[in-house]
Image (spheres, rainbow, N blue to C red):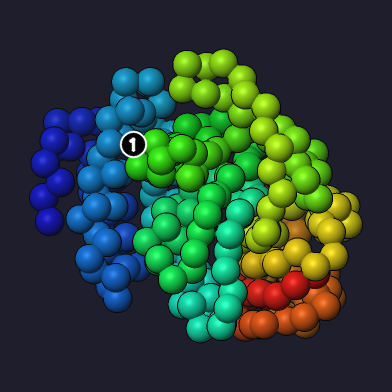
Amino acid sequence: MNPKGLLNKPDSLSVIESIYKISLGLKDNSSLIPQIIEDLKRVLNSAHKNQTSIKTVNYIERFSSKGQFKSKLWLIQKLKKIEFFELGQVFLCAGWCGTLAYLLFQEKTLKVKQIFNFDKDPLSITISEDLNRKWVKENWKFKATLKDILDLNYHSAQFNTLKKDGSSQELFVSPDTIINTSCEHIENFTNWWKKIPKGKKMILQSNNFYEDPEHINCVSSLKHFKNQAPLSQILFKGELNLGKYSRFMLIGNK
């Protein structure tokens, strides 16, 4: 594998290592690898222009880890087995760099209408829009917005997002599906959970990796996670062993 055009860039070895990690994580989805490499090269080139290359490389290394990709591919694999589960209008909460959205768009059977990625980190918003540029250009089939997920109204959200020219546009969106694969990062999880209307389709992940200082809301087990996020109907519940820690997942309706 020779990602042309990166070898004369600072930190290029780190990026190549990250791409290699992605290829390992996607061994059952090898057809995606060339496109992901091209899209990551574009993200990196944008980062160099914007002088955010060091932090962007760090993000790429983190979101291309085997654990991160295995968790997302596991989610997609289980979701595809649930009959009649259409994603529709999606709110991706604390969606970071938008890699889950990128992978979801590859699966036509999941019937994604639109994905809005909400995160508090400005750089992750920039990276996620660059990574998912193809769908940003499709009338905002993907759109990232800088916003705290505790400040959203999940009945019918009213929020402002930025257009390409930097101007603000107000949107009114009612989500069909709410995805949060970063539950371990949500400090006020109970407050967030209370904001979700009953009946909403939910896809949730958390973990027991207490060693990470950013994980301020870990759960010790799947049972603990079910108690933290009680669903009225559970379509899938499971645990993925990732070596150092386990990732837990719930899919269903609140």
Residue 25, horizontal then vertical, whole percent: 34, 68
Can residue 212 be seen here? The reply is no
Q: Position of residue 232 (x, y in %)?
A: 83, 78
Question: Is 220 situated left or right of 188 in this image?
Answer: left
Q: Amino acid at mark 1?
A: Val
Residue 117 drawn above or below residue 164:
below
Quadrant location of the C terminus?
A: bottom right
Q: Is residue 48 above or below residue 16?
A: above
**Residue nearer the viewer, 226 or 253:** 253
Residue designated by label 1: 43
User: Could you say whether the residue bearing mark 1 is in a helix, strand or loop?
Assistant: helix
- Say which of 130 and 142 sits in front: 142
Count all numbered tags in the image, as a single digit: 1
Residue at image coords 24%, 52%: 35
Image point (61%, 54%), residue name: 89
Please name the residue shown 13% across and 35% down the image: 5
Task: Give residue 11's quadrant in the image.
Answer: top left
| Residue 152, percent from left and from top | 77, 42
